[in-house]
Each structure stands twice: as structure tokens, then as C-alpha cells.
Amino acid sequence: MYEPKVRDGKLPAIAVSGPFGAVKEQSSGLYAQEMAKRGFITIAFDPSFTGESGGEPRYMNSPDINVEDFQAAVDFLSVCEEVDPEKISIIGICGWGGMALQTACIDTRIKATVAVTMYDMSRVSGNGYFDSADSEEARYAARVKLNAQRTADYKKGEYALGGGVVDPLPDDAPWFVKQYYDYYKTERGYHPRSLNSNGGWNVTAGTSLLNTRLFRYADEIRNAVLIVHGEKAHSRYMGEDAYKLLKGDNKELYIVPNATHCDLYDGGDGNYIPFDKIEKFIRKSI
């Protein structure tokens, strides 16, 4: 939890999480610290089953539980004596940008939602990257493989890890995988508790995401939503498509010139995170 150095009465607050498979000491902590400098009480948290959060078995995920994680953070902030409970917002980064938007579908206490360099993890799980495996046969093959792993894990009595960001990095790795490596596997963003920096999620962690589609009620979100993407981000199509689902004049898509997906994790080499834009949007929405 981070607090501004100067306080005058109850303050607006923000809960922050992401990227998907990261820990609070990485991107979300950076965002939380910066927004605290700008006058918000903030909390950066590890999702259930990861980092320093509880939950067994480790390294699992579930869209429903992940939404509950964001809602639990809002619960916490709403009863803090220093916080104005009518001025609570959330920021989600990467896969947690998608979870933030999903949370906005259900939690009317949230006055502004900011989804940065957003991934729709249900779409990637069901369709593959860039919708390259969007067919019944491809999904069936994924289900067969996933369920075979469940049987193997049960027999062995432990969960097999899927591996984090590939290391060593192959010469022919896709350009966006090279960007992940540059963040998670170097001093730029490596952390010993980060799934992406190390062994990754359990292989079977994708069970729920493969059987779920996010944003069913995105068109019913009444509170403000800002979707931020890099112009050169490989994930940009997911944010743009999510934005098309939204209704109302308090929704905005903001494209950061020249920025890639991972540039919005820590600013990259061009100070790309648009903190001024994020602050302005939240303040006008609360």
C-alpha cells in the first residue's frame, strides 16, 4: 500500500495488479507508487495463488477468482479511514487489464477502470495468439492435451509447470517473445517470485480460461473505462476489440505512439507510460 506524502482529508484510491504471471514488485508496484505520488492512496497486490498471496495449489488462475481478487482490493480500500469510498478506481496491466475490465462488469463501486496494454486471456486461451487457432478442432486438441495433463498430475501427486518466458531465447523467437525476455529475464524486470520470470503457471492453470469468455456484459458497464495500448503492441487488437464492446461517452481508447506491449510495463526506453493521461482520466471520472 502506498500513500501520498501530503494528505488533506479523505483521498481517492486505486487498486493495481498485473501483468498476468507477474508479481506486485514488478509493473503494478511501479504504477501504484507513481499514482501515490500524484495524490492517490494505492494498493498493488498479488493475485490468489501467486507471489505473496495465499491459495493452494500454487500457480493456478481462474477468471472468477481473479475478479474476486480485484473486488477484495476494493473491499479493503472502501473501509480505509483515509479513503473516500466513492472515489475508488482500478488499474489492470496486460492480462490483468482484461480482468480489470471484467471486474468493472460486476462491481459498481469502481468509478474508473484503466486497462493498460490489455490481454483478453480467455481469447488467447480459446483462439491462440492473433486468433491463429480459432477452430473447433484446435480447441478440441487443446482440451485433450490439457485433460491428459490433469490425469498425469493426479497420478504423480504434483502439478507440472508450463515454464515461464522461454530461456535461453531461440534466435527465431517471435518479436514479442523477445520483448518478454528483455523484461522478465533481465535485470530490467526479473523477480524471483514472478511466474513469468521463472517456472510459469501450472500446465493445467488454463482450464478455466479455455472454458470461459470474458466481457459478456461489457456493454453494460456504466462507469468510466480507459483502454491504453501501445501503437506497436502485438496485443493491441485485443484492446481495440474490447473497446468496441463498450457504450457511453465516458469510455476512451488511447494509443501511445511507438510503444510496444512491454514498454507499458515499465516505460521502456521512451518513458512511454502515459501517467498524465491516466491521472487526468481518473480524476475527471471520480
Image: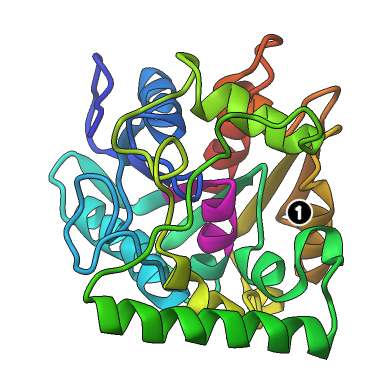
Compared with 36, 202 (above or below) is: below
Which of the two residues, 153 or 53, is positioned nearer the viewer here? 153
Choose top left, top right, bottom left or bottom right for residue 101.
bottom right
State the residue at coordinates (67%, 25%).
Answer: 263
State the residue at coordinates (55%, 75%).
Answer: 209
Residue type (three-letter) at the residue carrying disc 1: Gly
Which of the two residues, 7 or 54, is positioned nearer the viewer here? 54
Image position of 263 (left or right of 233): left
Please check the rendered image and state whether residue 128 is part of the magenta-colored stretch, yes or no: no
- Label 1: element kind: helix
What span is in magenta?
Answer: 89-101
Tag count: 1
Can you identify the residue that label 1 sits on? 239
Compared with 133, 136 (above or below) is: below
Q: Look at the image and tell me in which quarter the N terminus lies.
A: top left
Could you tell me if residue 212 is visible in this image?
no
Which of the two residues, 111 or 134, is positioned nearer the viewer here? 134
Residue 249 % position (x, y)? 77, 58
Residue 4 % position (x, y)? 28, 21
How is the structure coloured here?
Answer: rainbow
State the residue at coordinates (40%, 67%).
Answer: 61
Could you tell me if residue 51 is visible in this image?
yes
Compared with 58, 175 (above or below) is: above
State the residue at coordinates (80%, 33%).
Answer: 175
Compared with 84, 152 (above or below) is: below
Residue 257 % position (x, y)? 85, 24
